[in-house]
Image (cartoon, grey):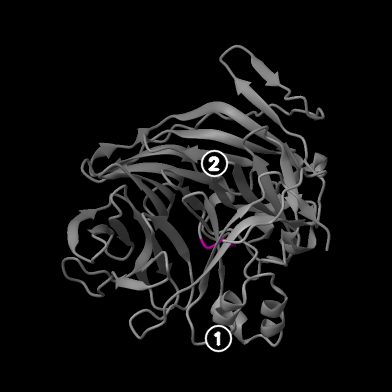
């Protein structure tokens, strides 16, 4: 681990926590600069009834808790570098049994990384905290315990793996050693899921023609039914809209986050089946309207040509001190860290280049560390050696990074941002 001196940031921004009650709204100003608060409207859920296995579709609760309001117009769109207090580079072992083409999703549990390569090897791999390969999970086929189309995965509190086969409409439960522990038929096809308990989970976007679209719901594998938490917003949730992130359910330990597409609503998903509106990004005029979204079906270029519109919120993760999120506005990526101590919000351009080299997106949480990666393609860039040489790391660490090549697996990066948010100038 490598330490960076601490210094209080001068770029901290304002935020206001809004506490909703039945009869009144209390705005608690934490002594930070005041901003305009636009109270959320239209939080009423639309009731939907579906027939699945001759059972009515349930309607579940979406709770309003203490909502953090972020006003984009009040943020300082800083391009400064975020300093890092601890960092560790973990090159993943490369063998014929574990050739990764892409880190589509990464989860961490009890010193092990669980990595899903969705587009190349289409498998789930387990590596320990030192990067040593442990196991490859999925067996392809149509038989018991076999998968045809691996679409998503999750893990439970024992480190067991839930693998979702969209083609066969089932979830298979594996141990970390690849043993089949159970197999469940799912009541509806979906894009992603977030498991909790032994047989329940959140799911994102139904994708069956004979089932009205649901943006966010719950499934029960034993009862074989689903509960609608957020009904689809018609054109905003249609599958014809391009997905820009590798996934849209973001796990931090036992907690998940979900952003309702083309809105500023970020929901916290708990392990008791409650989705709570946790963060509200505004103003509403910063998000695409229905006409804008409909036009995207034929031409995606407007999202990149219009820097005033937020067309994606992703990489929403949380450790003990910070909540991170990333907003796409035109061709720019607005990276935000929110302090859990005083709910101040900070924008930054990149992580400290004196210590950090790799993808600038946060892709997961490992204990209290944020996770990023160095994709294999970066090893072959002409300036790779220069970037490594400029890092303020011990020589033995830099030597390991220099020895990587295009045929090597990606490198996992674990790091913490400075607790006092020192911001470095370029």
Query: Horizontal placement of 197 versus 375: left or right?
Result: left
Task: Locate residue 235, reporting x and y percent.
Answer: 58, 50
- Tally of marks: 2
Residue drawn where x is 62% and y is 77% of the image: 395
State which quarter of the image contains the N terminus: bottom right
Report the front residue among 75 and 368.
Answer: 368
- Residue 170 falls in which quadrant of the image? bottom left
Query: Horizontal placement of 65 versus 7: left or right?
Result: left
- Residue 363 falls in which quadrant of the image? bottom right
Report the front residue among 52 and 198.
Answer: 198
Name the secondary structure under disc 1: loop
Would you say residue 208 is visible in this rendering? no
Look at mark 2 in the image and give the residue it sits on: 320
Q: Residues within 10 Å of mark 1 (few under 14, many from 20)?
A: few
Report the front residue among 3 and 223.
Answer: 3
Look at mark 1 in the image and give the residue it sits on: 403
| Magenta residues (range) | 242-246
Relative height, residue 140 to residue 314 (above, below):
below
Residue drawn where x is 23% and y is 40% of the image: 54
245 falls in the magenta region:
yes
Would you say residue 6 is visible in this rendering? yes
- Residue 136 falls in which quadrant of the image? bottom left
Task: Locate residue 62, reporting x and y percent.
Answer: 47, 31
């Amino acid at each position: 681990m490598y330490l960076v001196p601490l210094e209080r940031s001068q770029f901290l921004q304002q935020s206001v926590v809004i506490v909703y009650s039945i009869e009144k709204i209390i705005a608690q100003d934490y002594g930070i600069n005041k901003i305009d608060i636009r109270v959320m409207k239209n939080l009423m859920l639309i009731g939907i009834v579906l027939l699945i296995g001759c059972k009515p579709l349930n309607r579940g609760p979406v709770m309003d808790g203490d909502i953090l309001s972020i006003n984009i117009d009040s943020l300082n769109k800083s391009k400064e570098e975020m300093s890092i207090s601890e960092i560790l580079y973990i090159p993943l072992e490369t063998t014929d049994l574990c050739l990764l083409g892409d880190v589509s999703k990464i989860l961490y549990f009890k010193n092990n990384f669980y990595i899903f390569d969705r587009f190349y090897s289409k498998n789930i791999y387990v590596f320990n905290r030192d990067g040593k390969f442990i196991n490859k999970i999925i067996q392809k086929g149509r038989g018991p315990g076999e998968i045809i189309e691996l679409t998503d995965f999750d893990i439970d509190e024992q480190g067991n793996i839930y693998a979702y086969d969209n083609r066969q409409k089932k979830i298979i439960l594996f141990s970390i050693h690849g043993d089949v522990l159970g197999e469940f038929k799912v009541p509806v096809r979906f894009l992603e899921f977030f498991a909790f308990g032994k047989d329940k989970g959140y799911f994102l976007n139904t994708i069956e023609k004979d089932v009205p679209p649901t943006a966010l719901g719950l499934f029960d594998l034993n009862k074989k039914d689903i509960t609608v938490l957020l009904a689809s917003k018609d054109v905003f949730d249609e599958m014809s809209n391009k997905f820009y992130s590798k996934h849209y359910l973001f796990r931090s330990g036992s907690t998940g986050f979900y952003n309702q597409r083309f809105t500023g609503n970020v929901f916290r998903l708990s392990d008791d089946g409650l989705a709570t509106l946790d963060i509200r990004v505004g103003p509403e005029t910063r998000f695409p309207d229905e006409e804008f979204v409909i036009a995207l079906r034929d031409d995606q270029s407007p999202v990149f040509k219009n820097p005033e519109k937020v067309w994606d919120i992703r990489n929403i993760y949380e450790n003990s001190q910070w909540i991170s999120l990333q907003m796409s506005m035109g061709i720019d990526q607005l990276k935000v860290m929110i302090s859990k101590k005083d709910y101040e919000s900070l924008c930054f351009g990149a992580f400290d280049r004196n210590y950090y080299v790799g993808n600038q997106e946060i892709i997961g949480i490992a204990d209290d560390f944020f996770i990023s990666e160095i994709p294999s393609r970066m090893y072959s860039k002409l300036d790779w050696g220069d970037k490594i040489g400029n890092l303020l790391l011990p020589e033995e660490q830099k030597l390991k990074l220099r020895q990587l090549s295009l045929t090597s697996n990606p490198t996992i990066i674990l790091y913490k941002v400075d607790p006092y948010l020192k911001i470095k100038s370029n």
